[in-house]
Image (cartoon, grey):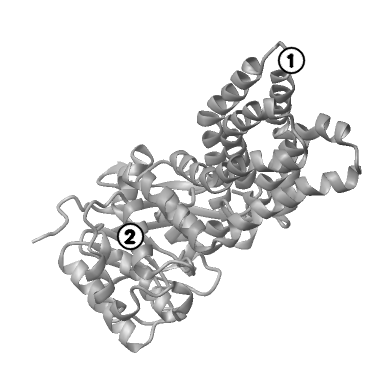
Amino acid sequence: MHAFLGLIRHDLRLAARQGGDIGLVLGFFILAVILYPFGIGPEPELLRRIAAGIIWVAALLAAVLSLDRLFASDYGDGGLDLIALSAMPLELAVLAKSAAHWLTTGLPLVVVSPVLALFVDLDPAALPALVVGLLLGTPAMSLIGAIAAALSLGARRPGVLLTLLVLPLYLPPLIFGTAAVEASLSAEGARAHLLLLAALTMAALPLAPLAAGAALRQALD
Amino acid sequence: MSLFPETAELVGENLACRRGERLVFRGLECRLPPGGTLVVTGPNGSGKSSLLRLLATLLVPAAGRLLWNGAPVARDPAGYRGAIHYVGHLDGVKPALTPREMLGFWTALRGAEHPAIDAALAMFGLEGVADWPCRWLSAGQRRRLALARLIAAPAPIWLLDEPSAALDGDGEARLAAVIAAHRDAGGSVAVATHQPLAITGAMSLALDDFAAPAAELLAV
């Protein structure tokens, strides 16, 4: 437990000290969302219809942008050796790093998403479904991203490989996340989709660390 | 009198290491008794770093096995990892953090409840820079910081890969003193090095003796 909390604290401290990383992710998220109204032109009806999709896709891309720093710097500077030799199994270390990643990227994305919803004219009634959906879905994104980040270590162009690996895996949270927003405006209600998002995160919680741990062992060898 | 009663002999049996298609060494036998020092020598590429990574369980041997306390390390890898310190040639220092924060993190990773961080910093002469960001440290100071891990949380077996690289004369003297104190306390040290270290009574292991002939490269 000491080692687990120590690793989270270390990663949070690093992120705070290198504030640029969080700023970069948030900046990308905000700019990507703001680009759509310019690209689509003055058609509030169309914008409002695709608002949830815009925010979810931009959030996914922003999350991908931040994944390369999850293990790559520790891999490059030898820190990963020490994590592998620590008092906790590598799987727990993956969980700790994913938690720190979510706290420094997923959570800020959730926090700014209501403001961005204004830019794309999302129906205020759908706002709770958007925010709760992101809150439930972004942890799965950090966890699934950890698998791809671990697999891409040692590749010649890790950033590109990582993106190609992770985007298809992000389809389920994207589908349920946008569907939740849509459904919240109909009689159906967002509950079923939000539960599915929660299920995704609950499934990724034990499975992703196992997969990423195996990939890290491969990278260390 | 031993500080580390749990220290037991580390034995490598018939170890082979393979990197990609190349068999780096094979048939390697080594013993590291409590209080002992093993100096690993050999030309570049002979597998010194690979042997130390193998002893640290970071590499899986292509053949052979490690025994610690008379039992295979593979049976209780977590227990064994708690008993070793591995200092490789990459030091894992984050430019944005201070030496004190780095040592705090490293000892937390080991699960150490009461790390001797100040003593470790003092032992390697880093008190003056303890609260600077590591990006201002020189290569030698980073090296000292990596070595300070050895003091901050005790472990009976030290695996050191070129520990004196980038160290100045004062740093080397401090390292030799730390190693001597560790051995006197019953700890053991395996060190890969080019520079002659001032260690008395060290056993030496020349890796050229275990190099695989070219014909064997693809055979195993």
Can residue B12 be seen by looking at this rendering? yes
Quarter of the figure with residue B120: bottom left
Q: Residue at x 52, y 48 (%)?
A: B62
**What chain is tagged by disc 1?**
A
State the quadrant of the N terminus of chain B: bottom left
> Tag 2: residue type?
Gly
Q: Which mark is residue A186?
A: 1
Residue B16 placement (x, y as % from top left): 49, 53
Instruction: Name the side, left or right, on which B214 lies relative to A165.
Output: left
> Alpha carbon of mark 2 to alpha carbon of mark 1: how far?
53 Å
> Tag 1: residue type?
Ser
Q: Disc 2 or disc 1, which is closer to the eye?
A: 1
Q: Nearer the viewer, residue A170 or A91?
A: A170
Residue A176 placement (x, y as % from top left): 69, 24
**What chain is tagged by disc 2?**
B
Callout 2 and callout 1 share a chain:
no
Residue furthest to the top in view is A187
Q: Residue at x 52, y 36 (%)?
A: A209
Q: Nearer the viewer, residue B124 or A52?
A: A52
Q: Which mark is residue B104?
A: 2
Q: Residues within 10 Å of mark 1 (few under 14, many from 20)?
A: few
Residue B17 placement (x, y as % from top left): 52, 54
